[in-house]
């Protein structure tokens, strides 16, 4: 953990172990391997900035208060996991199964597709698990073995009933396109602990969610804070291996570009877009040396491969296992924020179970269950879980009554997430939905509260992490959000 803390995030940027600040300009002047383009100044317009040197993400910065988490792994469940089929047990669904929900439940909110069927019990049996006795279903048998490490939030809500806006809200705190992602805010606030890999990495299992890559963008923050997208395959991204076969020729080209960068900077002065582009290309050059090794899992033991499910007979378990194991390797190397998307399962490629709930949720759970449990076990065994916050969430939940005969529609009024590690109490639940699992009624939470709590665990006061844009000091939680103190250790 860091031992000294400055009262704000407005001080000089320092690399860990350095006794003085190093500005972006000074870093460029000292660089022996600048790697950028020539005419970027003409391609980018003016953007507002606070004036502190923030365009370089490859630095560490001091938090507001002592953190309990250094890194975040966000397990994004695209489409929305049904809370009443996973972590929110409601016996009423069994009692009133098959009945008209308008009579059994009462007033129903408008649903996305307005194809309302009967009250539907869960196809998966619920039971109390672990020493904590928390109720969960059989949907995640492997994750259930780690129930005493989980903090289940049962009263989360969203403001949006459709995927695109709900995804933006989950990732950026607003339902509008173009705002910075939570991963971008985290790396903006704290920087990276490794100059050779990005501070914010998206491991794409095959599905980019509704709303596209803007879910993982830097928005109005400097471009260095956007997610770098890696795929768990070879190659993980374009041009990760140098195209030049002659290393001397590549070095000469980099030297030429470095000199041209310096002349351009001298001509145009401080321009965030230009400096961010230079920083991104410098990082790209360093990634050519580090990323191929990082994503090579051959050095992991057979036991580790088996733990994660890399030898599974289900190809999508193998796919998600690579993502989870790679996520562990990334945070070991100091990556601040890692997000995983779901694998693309043919016919049921999201948790969006408007029909065929059993097959949809069954296949998606089979893909992620073993790898997620392995991630928690592996992090704990390596002494990393206490300083790594793992978050499991979709953009909303699903209705306690059927859509048609065997599906569930979107439900933003109450759903479940869970957190583990990083200063969060394990073996507890917080908040409650009503007796149907329909609407949050006790300790109602919003996405802003999740974001405030995540930043708090990283050592950041969400009200003080701001960026001036369009005449306002904007933040991830806007003017909302509270830290969920009740779940902290």
Image (cartoon, rainbow, N blue to C red):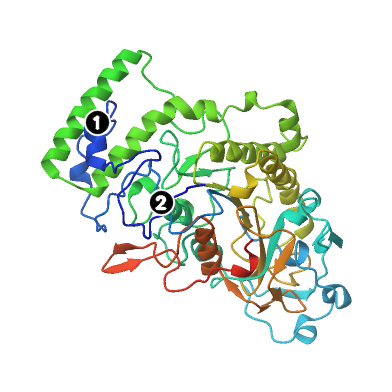
Residue 353 appears in the rendering: no
Nearer the observer, 321 or 328: 328
- Indicate which disc, 2 or 1, sits on the residue closer to the N terminus: 1
Q: Nearer the viewer, mark 2 or mark 1?
A: 2
Residue at the image point whose x is 45% and y is 64% from the top: 462
Q: Quadrant of residue 195?
A: top left
Q: Which residue is mark 2?
A: 62
Confirm or deny contact between disc 2 and disc 1 (CB under 8 A): no
Relative to 452, is 222 above or below?
above
Question: What label sits on residue 30 in the rendered view?
Answer: 1
User: Height in image: 16 above or below 357?
Assistant: above
Q: Is residue 477 left or right of residue 142?
A: left
Q: Residue 412: x percent and y percent?
A: 61, 71
Other residues around mark 1 within 10 Å, as few (<14) / some (14–19) / many (≥20): few
Q: x, y percentage for residue 171?
A: 50, 59
Task: Point out which mark residue 201 bears.
Answer: none
Question: Can you see residue 190?
Answer: yes
Q: Nearer the viewer, residue 311 or 1?
A: 1
Vertical relation: 213 (above or below) 38: below
Foreground residue among 186 and 485: 485
- Pick the quarter of the image with the C terminus: bottom right
Q: Nearer the viewer, residue 242 or 209?
A: 242
Estimate how packed mark 2 is, as few (under 14), some (14 to 19) or many (20 or more) residues with alpha carbons within 10 Å: many
Label 2 to label 1: alpha-carbon separation: 24 Å
Judged from the image, the secondary structure of the residue bearing numbered disc 2 is: loop
Q: Residue at x 45, y 46 (%)?
A: 227
Residue at 77% from the left image edge and 63% from the top image edge? 85
At 45% from the left and 67% from the top, the residue drawn is 477
> Dot 1 lies on which element?
helix
Q: Give residue 310's position: percent from left, percent from top.
A: 71, 33
């Amino acid at each position: 953990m860091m031992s000294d803390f400055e009262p704000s995030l407005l001080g000089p940027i320092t690399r860990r172990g350095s006794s003085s600040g190093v500005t972006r300009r000074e870093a460029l002047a000292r660089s022996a391997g600048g790697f950028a383009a020539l005419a970027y100044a003409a391609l980018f317009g003016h953007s507002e900035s606070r004036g502190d040197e923030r365009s370089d993400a490859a630095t560490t910065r001091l938090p507001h208060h002592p953190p309990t988490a250094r890194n975040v792994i966000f397990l994004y469940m695209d489409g929305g996991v049904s809370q009443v089929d996973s972590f929110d047990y409601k016996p009423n669904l069994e009692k009133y199964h098959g009945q008209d929900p308008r009579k059994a439940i009462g007033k129903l909110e408008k649903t996305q597709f307005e194809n309302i069927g009967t009250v539907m019990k869960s196809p998966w049996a619920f039971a109390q698990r672990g020493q904590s006795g928390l109720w969960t279903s059989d949907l995640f048998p492997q994750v259930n073995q780690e129930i005493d490490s989980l903090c289940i939030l049962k009263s989360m809500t969203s403001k949006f009933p459709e995927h695109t806006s709900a995804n933006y809200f989950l990732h950026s705190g607003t339902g509008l396109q173009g705002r910075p992602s939570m991963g971008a805010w985290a790396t903006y606030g704290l920087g990276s602990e490794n100059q050779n890999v990005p501070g914010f990495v998206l491991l794409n299992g095959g599905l980019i969610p509704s709303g596209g890559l803007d879910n993982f963008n830097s928005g109005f923050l400097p471009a260095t804070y956007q997610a770098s997208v890696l795929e768990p395959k070879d190659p993980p991204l374009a041009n990760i291996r140098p195209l030049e076969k002659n290393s001397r020729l590549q070095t000469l080209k980099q030297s030429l570009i470095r000199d041209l960068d310096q002349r351009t900077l001298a001509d145009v002065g401080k321009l965030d877009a230009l400096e961010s582009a230079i920083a991104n290309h410098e990082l790209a050059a360093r990634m050519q040396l580090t990323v191929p090794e990082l994503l090579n899992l051959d050095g992991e033991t057979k036991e580790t491969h088996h733990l994660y499910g890399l030898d599974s007979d289900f190809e999508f378990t193998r796919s998600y296992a690579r993502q989870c194991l790679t996520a562990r390797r990334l945070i070991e190397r100091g990556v601040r924020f890692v997000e995983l998307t779901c694998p693309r399962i043919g016919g049921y490629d999201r948790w969006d179970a408007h029909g065929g709930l059993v097959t949809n949720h069954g296949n998606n759970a089979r893909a992620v269950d073993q790898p997620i449990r392995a991630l928690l076990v592996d992090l704990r065994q390596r002494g990393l879980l206490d300083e790594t916050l793992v978050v499991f969430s979709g953009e909303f939940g699903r209705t306690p009554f059927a859509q048609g005969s065997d599906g569930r529609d979107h439900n933003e009024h109450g759903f479940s997430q869970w957190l583990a590690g990083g200063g969060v109490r394990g073996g507890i639940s917080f908040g409650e939905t009503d007796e149907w699992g329909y609407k949050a009624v006790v300790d109602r939470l919003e996405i802003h509260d999740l974001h405030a709590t995540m930043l708090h665990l990283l050592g950041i006061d969400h009200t003080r992490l701001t960026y001036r844009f369009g005449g306002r000091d904007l933040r991830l939680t806007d003017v909302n959000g509270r830290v969920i103190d009740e779940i902290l250790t």
